[in-house]
Image (spheres, rainbow, N blue to C red):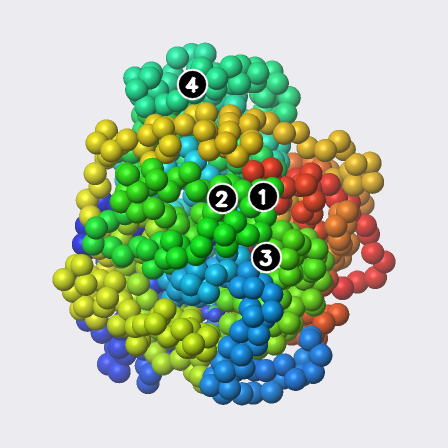
Amino acid sequence: MPGAPSVTPSAVGSRSIPRSNPRPGVETRKALCASCDIACSVVTEIQKGRVTRVRSSDNPLFKDNICVKGIVAPKNFANPDRVLHPLKRVGERGSGQWQQVTWDEAMADIGARLTRIIDTHGPEAWAVSTSQWNTGTDHGLGRRLMNHIGSPNWISGVALCAGNTAAVNRLTYGWYPWPDYDNTSCIVLFGHNPGRNSWVPVYNQIQRVKARGGKLIVLDPRKSECAELADLWLPLKVGTDAVMMFGWLKVIFDEGLYDRAFVDRWCTGFDELRRRVDEFPLSRVAAITGCSPELIARAARMYATMGPSVIPWTPITDQQRNSTSGIRLQSILRAVCGYLDVPGGEAMMGFHPKIVSESEIEMHHVLPESQKAKQLGSDRHPAFTYRGQAALREPCKRVWGHEYANQVTGCYMANPSALFRAMAGDGPYPVKALFSLGNNTLMSYANMPLILRAFMNQELIVVQEHVMTPTAQLADYVLPGDSWLERPWMFDGYGWLSLYKPSQKSMEPPGTCKSTFEFWKLMANALGRPEIVPWPTLEAFYDWRIAGLGLDFETFARTYDVHADKLEFRKYERTGFATPSGKVELRSSILADLGFDPLPYWRDAPPPDPDYPLEMFTGVREAEYFQTGGRHIPEMRARKPEPVLFVSPATAAAEGLGEGEWVTVETRTGAIEITVGIRANMPDGLVRIPHGWWKPEMEQGAGRLSGALRYADALLCPDDEDFLDAEQGIPHLKGVPCRIVRRSGGAA
Ligand SMILES: Nc1nc2c(c(=O)[nH]1)N[C@H]1C(S)=C(S)[C@@H](COP(=O)(O)OP(=O)(O)OC[C@H]3O[C@@H](n4cnc5c(=O)[nH]c(N)nc54)[C@H](O)[C@@H]3O)O[C@H]1N2
Ligand SMILES: Nc1nc2c(c(=O)[nH]1)N[C@H]1C(S)=C(S)[C@@H](COP(=O)(O)OP(=O)(O)OC[C@H]3O[C@@H](n4cnc5c(=O)[nH]c(N)nc54)[C@H](O)[C@@H]3O)O[C@H]1N2
Ligand code: SF4
Ligand SMILES: [Mo]
């Protein structure tokens, strides 16, 4: 997911603090790291036209916001296997036979083939899968082109990471808020585990809050690094976050710890909610979560009574069977405790009159309603589709002045599983072209066997990448993408925060690597619609976006580190909330109208499966890699050469497993090979599977895919209805029945 910006909202127009060049012959630039999704402000050092070092920003606001992935970026992007020129498939799909072509040749052919597909099957036969931070300069231009051409079928990794949280938060109070870490009294982490090499800015914020006496509550089945720091650690059972929150609400309501005045004036559906919460006595919550009633009550009291507290975004509740209820319960906790849009609580920033949001650039209003209605998956699982968010258009306009707020790009997506089914030929209509930009599509959703079938059934697959990922190996065209060292960038906080942060270009891209901005511009031209992306260059586009501040991009990037206005709190007192009722909808009128339970609820896991007695989750991010990327960097591979599962000592003993041994893990969906790591901090019966493993050095092409067919967690993740959240249709990755099979012999 994205993630989040590394600046607190109170930082207004912070000027940069220039430092003299460290050594003669060394130039410096201010950049934003895009090696993950949180955009740390960093400094690049350049010698002879190449970046030789990445270090932390000189601005005290961003002090120490850097990690190993940012530091290793120059080596990452200089790797000898980087794709430097467009490649065209010449053999069968996946045969590994490529011909180098020019951008002109590639784009002319892609334009002609996509036009044929659209003419034959309609614009909805064209799908895009992307993630905003890897491509950086997409800036909503892909959506803009799709909206003009007529396709609603855009998906992204943000369906499993923050984008869906944003969409579900909007159902309750119209905007996805951001924690005011600087003033908060208590932080609650549902699994989320920032560290020195994972979301460092948030980790540093947690340290600062702790240092001034604030509290930290961590809910995690495993004693994680953040759990070690916590004042309270709740070792809940995997996948039970939603029921835990019912327990907290039970305590908060029974003990009168909520903000009655706010609830009375600003919330709908309190009485109904309260009756629902009464179905969750702590004995029931304790039985499901495995935590004692006393511990649950202590945590609930701490959250409700410490003063303004925050529940930062977490991917853990994004990826569960009860995701919509879990995210709604987080929203409800914020609201009933009076922590919404107050100092130290969670701030709703809205649109800013001088900041051109990507929602505006996307131009969702030009996509006809008849095409919006074709968005795949919106019939069964509408929450983050156009249909699910439609009732927010008028309220959003009323409160924020804009009809469409595509926060974290997650509010108008197609459903990934439904899209893959249609691509495979099992949908309501054919989908025949997939563009995958900065996104390892094949490995980044559930049910990889289905995605593979979907890929093999395409007429046109276009990938923009740095390296020959398993996804790229199945493409018709692989186009070389530039990196964050090689392009300017302006970050706007994903429409979650309202700010601009600039990034200077540090060096020229190698070969003919291009930005995603340039790709969409060439694509608009190739479809005969140059007016859709009218700006001649990326810099000219940024000049246009920043004109409201009375600056040009070059001056802004040279002079400032960030532009953000001072926060105004309790805006709702002036405007109401951007929901149909104008209030916080504890009972969601939108979910009711869509035919779902308007209150959060608890859906039990399917009955235990004796053939698959253990449970697995995917996650615990690897310090060295970002998601499926980075396995080609020798310095990082030396530190983490193989995928490792984690099990407790007792589970290892029961299964007869030894440290470092290769095993097979199986679910009903598929199987992977992996090594064993025995970890004292794992609960018994739970298996951690790392996300995104493949080995760039292994054989490429269909049937091999550089080890992705052996190691990728997505092979294990189901997407049948039992394992999908009902409202969103996103897969349950936190608690899937599995088994471990010992292998005779050594390395896989
Ligand atoms: N099965 C399963 N699926 C998951 C998850 C999981 O745990 N399990 N996690 C989910 C989460 S939390 C997320 S955030 C998503 C992430 O899903 P993705 O956004 O697909 O993330 P990555 O795996 O990082 O793939 C990004 C690709 O972009 C390329 N890239 C990097 N920088 C650039 C660039 O500047 N330009 C271009 N053109 N390409 C670039 C990299 O080489 C890499 O191959 O996946 C989600 N999907
Ligand atoms: N170095 C590095 N940093 C990264 C990334 C990376 O790939 N590498 N990826 C980035 C991205 S896109 C994301 S989304 C974040 C993800 O980072 P985090 O939000 O920290 O997520 P994970 O590391 O997957 O898991 C965090 C914790 O969730 C616990 N957990 C597992 N299942 C459950 C459950 O059901 N409930 C609860 N409450 N806890 C559970 C795990 O035990 C683990 O300790 O990290 C970001 N930072
Ligand atoms: S946390 Fe690391 S990878 Fe992410 S933006 Fe910051 S330095 Fe880059
Ligand atoms: Mo993520």
Dot 3 crowding, Cα within 10 Å, few <14, some 14–19, many 20+:
many
Residue at the spot of label 1: 379
Q: Quote the CA–CA distance across marks 3 and 1.
A: 23 Å
**Residue 682 percent location from the top left of the image:** 63, 40
Dividing the picture into quadrants, the one containing residue 167 is top left
Residue at the spot of label 4: 270
Q: Quote the CA–CA distance across marks 3 and 2.
A: 24 Å
Figure check: 399 above or below 631: above
Contact between labelled residues 2 and 1, with CB atoms less than 8 Å apart: yes
Residue at the spot of label 2: 387
Amino acid at the residue labelled 1: Asp
Q: Quote the CA–CA distance across marks 1 and 2.
A: 8 Å
Residue at the spot of label 3: 444
Q: Is residue 536 visible?
A: yes
Point out the frontmost of discs 4 and 2: 2
Figure check: 221 above or below 563: above
Q: Nearer the viewer, residue 719 or 107?
A: 107
